Image: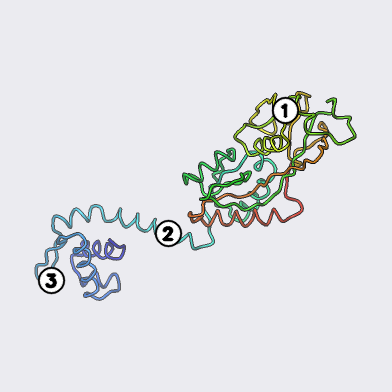
């Protein structure tokens, strides 16, 4: 059932005349008759009894009349919502972000998005990269701004926006903090490591590095958030690997022989999902922000 046919039906029902309905809708009587005939064909039943020049609702017509206005209102609402997709008015943005990107990169991007789209409703969910990947595969979310795992699932695609250089760090009071020479990786093996969960990309980078040098990674304290890890390292409870953006005066970077590590941060999305206009606008802002020399906030 289309909007025009329903409007013609209600007008005929109200006025009791095809010709008078045509006059109100600025249509010819044959045009009104055609719309009613199409509607009756779709429903498989007569909606009007035609007696002379007057028309009367059948039982089916009376039933439709009681619900037609609701149908028209719903169709107009759907039409308006879909039309907005081709307009410049963005009403909603849904995305997932890691806590790290949320704290250090996302703020300026969202500020610009809100400035450009003041009526948009934001729905930002914070989750770790592994949770985000699963949510993308289940199509629960459109995009995720997070650490890009390697390898990436074949159904997903990623755009790298930032490269996080990773540093081995200890507190200022740690015995290794005063070392001026480059350390060997095995000097960390017998010390307590404070690291993210074993399923995270950051932990896997560290684990593969130790495996590549044939060194066991022991005495690991698992902590969920990098900010918490930084606090524990600052209190001299162990060493860790942290992004450059998180370094502060309470930490000392260790220079490790033959080891330079980094991780890629950016946007992950499903290859076969068409993203909304709001998401496309955010992606454009994120890419632009990543190319600016001032992209982080502390």
Q: Which secondary structure, mark 1?
A: strand
CA gap between label 1 and label 3 equals: 91 Å
Return the x and y of residue 124 as percentages of the image width and height: 56, 43
Task: Give the mark, 2 or 1, whose residue is nearer the N terminus.
Answer: 2
How many other residues sit within 10 Å of disc 2, few (<14), some (14-19) or many (≥20)? few
Split into 4 quadrants, where in the image is the C terminus?
Answer: top right
Q: In the rendering, at what x and y percent does residue 97 appear?
A: 60, 43
Q: Nearer the viewer, residue 1 or 155?
A: 155
Residue name at image x 58 percent, y 38 percent: 127
- The single residue placed furthest to the front in the displayed view is 214
Q: Give the answer, above or below, for where 25 lies relative to 84.
A: below
Q: Where is residue 58 in the image (x, y as percent from the top left)?
A: 13, 58
Residues 102 and 180: in front is 180
Quadrant in the rendering for residue 193: top right
**Tags 2 and 3 touching, CB below 8 Å:** no
Disc 3 crowd rating (10 Å Cα; few below 14, some 14-19, many 20+) is few
Q: What element carries label 2?
A: helix
* Label 1 Cα neighbours within 10 Å, binned few <14 / some 14-19 / many ≥20: many
Q: Mark 2 points at which residue?
A: 80
**Location of mark 1 (residue):** 193
Question: What residue is pinned by disc 3?
Answer: 53
In this rendering, is residue 44 above or below 31?
Answer: above
Tally of numbered tags: 3
Quarter of the image that includes the N terminus: bottom left
In this view, 163 is above or below 211: below
Comparing 98 with 80, the one in front is 98
Disc 2/disc 3 C-alpha distance (Å): 37 Å
Mark 2 and mark 1: Cα distance apart in space = 56 Å
């Amino acid at each position: 059932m289309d909007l025009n046919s329903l409007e013609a039906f209600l007008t005929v029902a109200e006025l009791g005349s095809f010709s008078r309905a045509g006059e109100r809708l600025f249509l010819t009587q044959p045009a009104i008759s055609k719309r009613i005939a199409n509607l009756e064909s779709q429903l498989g039943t007569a909606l009007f009894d035609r007696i002379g020049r007057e028309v009367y609702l059948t039982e089916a017509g009376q039933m439709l009349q009681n619900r037609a206005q609701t149908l028209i209102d719903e169709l107009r609402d759907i039409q308006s919502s879909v039309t907005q997709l081709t307009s410049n008015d963005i009403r909603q943005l849904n995305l997932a972000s890691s806590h790290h990107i949320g704290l250090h990169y996302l703020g300026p991007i969202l500020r610009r998005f809100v400035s450009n789209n003041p009526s948009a409703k934001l729905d930002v969910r914070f989750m770790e990269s592994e949770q985000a990947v699963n949510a993308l595969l289940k199509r629960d979310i459109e995009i995720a701004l997070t650490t890009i795992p390697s390898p990436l699932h074949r159904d997903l695609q990623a755009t790298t926006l930032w490269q996080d250089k990773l540093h081995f760090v200890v507190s200022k009071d740690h015995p290794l903090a005063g070392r001026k020479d480059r350390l060997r990786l095995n000097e960390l093996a017998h010390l307590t490591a404070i690291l993210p969960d074993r399923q995270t990309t950051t932990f896997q980078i560290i684990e593969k590095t130790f495996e590549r040098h044939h060194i066991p990674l022991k005495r690991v304290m698992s902590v969920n958030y990098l900010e918490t890890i930084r606090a524990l390292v600052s209190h001299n409870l162990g060493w860790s690997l942290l992004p450059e953006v998180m370094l502060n005066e309470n930490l000392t970077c260790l220079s490790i022989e033959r080891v330079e590590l980094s991780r890629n941060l950016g946007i992950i999305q499903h290859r076969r999902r068409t993203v909304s206009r709001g998401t496309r606008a955010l992606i454009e802002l994120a890419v632009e922000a990543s190319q600016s020399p001032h992209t982080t906030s502390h």
